[in-house]
Amino acid sequence: MLHLLYILAFTILAFLAVGNLIRSLITLSTESHKLSAPSEWNPGPAQSAQNRYRRVPHPEFLDNNGNVVNEPLLVMKSMTVEDARTKLDALYNSSPGVNGETSEQA
């Protein structure tokens, strides 16, 4: 009899947890549609209550005048493995505590 009571209690808890999960997902979905970003970062003055939640860009996306930067922020040069290894070796050899000897002597 006690086993049936445990099964009933955990079944009720499982239904409550799944129901709460579904309600949370629905609430999150409706709030994300309400607070969706406008097509541009700076839409100007807010015309309605929906526009009062404007997304403010991160300061790194702004130039000195406060305008949004529309160019790539990171440009990476491709390099070969040998170039990377020589740069790392040079960095290691120039660090303090290294007396210029390599440990490749075996």
Image (tube, grey):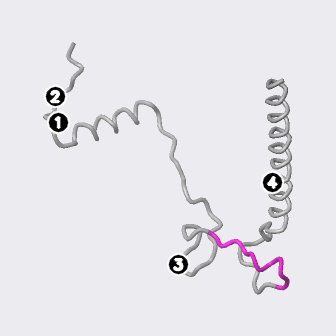
The residue at 79%/30% (across/down) is: 6
Determine whether label 4 and label 2 are within 8 Å by CB.
no
Q: Secondary structure at mark 1?
A: loop
Determine whether label 3 and label 4 are within 8 Å by CB.
no
Give the number of the disc on residue 101: 2
Q: Position of residue 57 (x, y in %)?
A: 64, 70
Determine whether label 3 and label 2 are within 8 Å by CB.
no
Is the residue 56 above or below the residue 102 in the image?
A: below
**C-alpha span from label 3 to label 2:** 47 Å
The tag earlier along the polypeptide, 3 or 2, is 3
Tell me the residue that label 3 is attached to: 64
Amino acid under label 2? Glu
Tell me the residue that label 1 is attached to: 98
The tag earlier along the polypeptide, 1 or 3, is 3
Q: Nearer the viewer, mark 2 or mark 1?
A: 1
Q: Mark 3: few, some, or many residues within 10 Å (few <14, many ≥20)?
A: few
Give the number of the disc on residue 5: none
Q: Nearer the viewer, mark 3 or mark 4?
A: 4
Tell me the residue that label 4 is attached to: 24
Q: Which residues are magenta?
A: 47-57
Left or right for 84, reference 38: left
**Looking at the image, which residue sits at the far front?**
1
The residue at 17%/43% (across/down) is: 96
Query: Is 21 or 58 nearer to us in this picture?
Result: 21
The tag earlier along the polypeptide, 4 or 1, is 4
